Image (cartoon, helix red, strand yellow):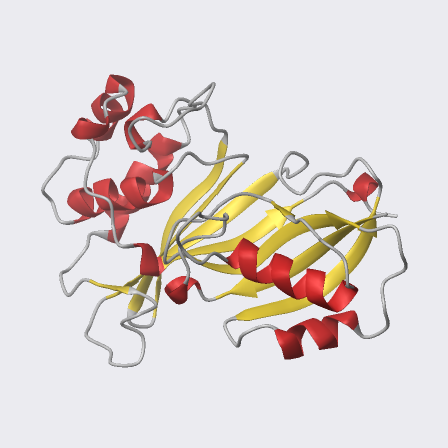
């Protein structure tokens, strides 16, 4: 039987979601915990992969098991797992449901702290400069006009297409933070961090809003802005069709 598992994690200590040969990953820790508690080898398939240092407020993965799940498995997992990984739900789904390929959309947030804060320097990018919110949101309107985002993709990425359907992109001021929200059907490697770095240049007045058209149409990563640090990025949500659930 197949199950979806919903979790969150603080990515600071991990080399991303996906298993790595010489580095610790969230996937490895979760697989080890499930295998130990269920007393059989369990492999999990994630909804996607987050880079080293990126956090997830909501992540999904699926795993298969023939036996019945033990009572209180969520409680047992949370007791067994390290404090920076939390399990929220384990839900039965149909046998063909896939955590990655059935996802309808993914939403990321990027947090920028506009003043020095000793309590969140590991969880938001500190940028003590004035950004033009109006210009940032005008640039977001341009993002919604395109599908090919090769200019924001990490070089030498093995993908069949650079097309992504961006459904939402906006900036909001929340207290001493600026939060960028972007929602799409899929994301390329490093895409969100490259978009944020490019938009920061626009917000600082280093680049005109309309220049974003030229950057995107160039399909050239060197034309876009810098990649912001990973620790400000959060996978916030993943949406699935209702029919996959039992």
Residue located at (40% from left, 24% from top): 146
Residue 88 can be seen, yes or no: yes
Residue located at (66% from left, 59% from top): 6
Q: Quadrant of residue 97?
A: top right
* Residue 33 sits above or below residue 94 on the image: below
Residue located at (46% from left, 50% from top): 108
* Residue 207 sits above or below residue 134 on the image: above
Q: Position of residue 3 (x, y in %)?
A: 78, 51
Residue located at (26% from left, 52% from top): 133
Left or right for 26, reference 86:
left
Q: Position of residue 81 (x, y in %)?
A: 59, 72
**Viewer-side residue, 119 vs 139:** 119
Q: Position of residue 190 (x, y in %)?
A: 34, 40
Which residue ends up furthest to the left in the rendered image?
A: 206
Left or right for 102, reference 245:
left
Q: Position of residue 178 (x, y in %)?
A: 31, 61
């Amino acid at each position: 039987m197949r199950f979806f598992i919903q979790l969150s994690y603080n990515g600071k200590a991990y080399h991303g979601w996906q298993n790595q040969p010489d580095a610790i990953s969230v996937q490895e820790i979760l697989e080890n915990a499930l295998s130990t508690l269920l007393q059989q080898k369990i492999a999990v398939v994630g909804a996607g992969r987050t880079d080293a240092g990126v956090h997830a407020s909501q992540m999904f993965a699926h795993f298969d098991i023939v036996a019945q799940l033990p009572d209180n498995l969520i409680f047992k997992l949370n007791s067994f797992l390290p404090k920076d990984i939390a399990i929220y739900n384990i839900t039965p789904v149909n046998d063909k449901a896939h955590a990655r390929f059935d996802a309808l959309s993914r939403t990321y947030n990027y947090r920028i702290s506009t003043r020095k804060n000793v309590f969140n320097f590991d969880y938001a990018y500190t940028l003590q400069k004035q950004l033009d919110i109006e210009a940032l949101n005008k640039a977001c309107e341009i993002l919604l006009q395109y599908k090919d985002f090769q200019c924001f993709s990490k070089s030498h990425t093995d993908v069949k297409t650079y097309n992504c359907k961006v459904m939402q992109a906006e900036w909001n001021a929340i207290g001493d933070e600026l939060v960028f929200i972007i929602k799409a059907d899929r994301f390329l490697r490093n895409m969100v961090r490259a978009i944020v770095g490019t938009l920061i240049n626009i917000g600082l007045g280093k680049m005109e809003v309309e220049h974003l058209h030229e950057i995107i149409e160039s399909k050239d990563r060197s034309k876009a802005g810098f990649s912001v640090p990973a620790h400000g990025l959060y996978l916030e949500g993943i949406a699935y069709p209702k029919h996959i659930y039992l």
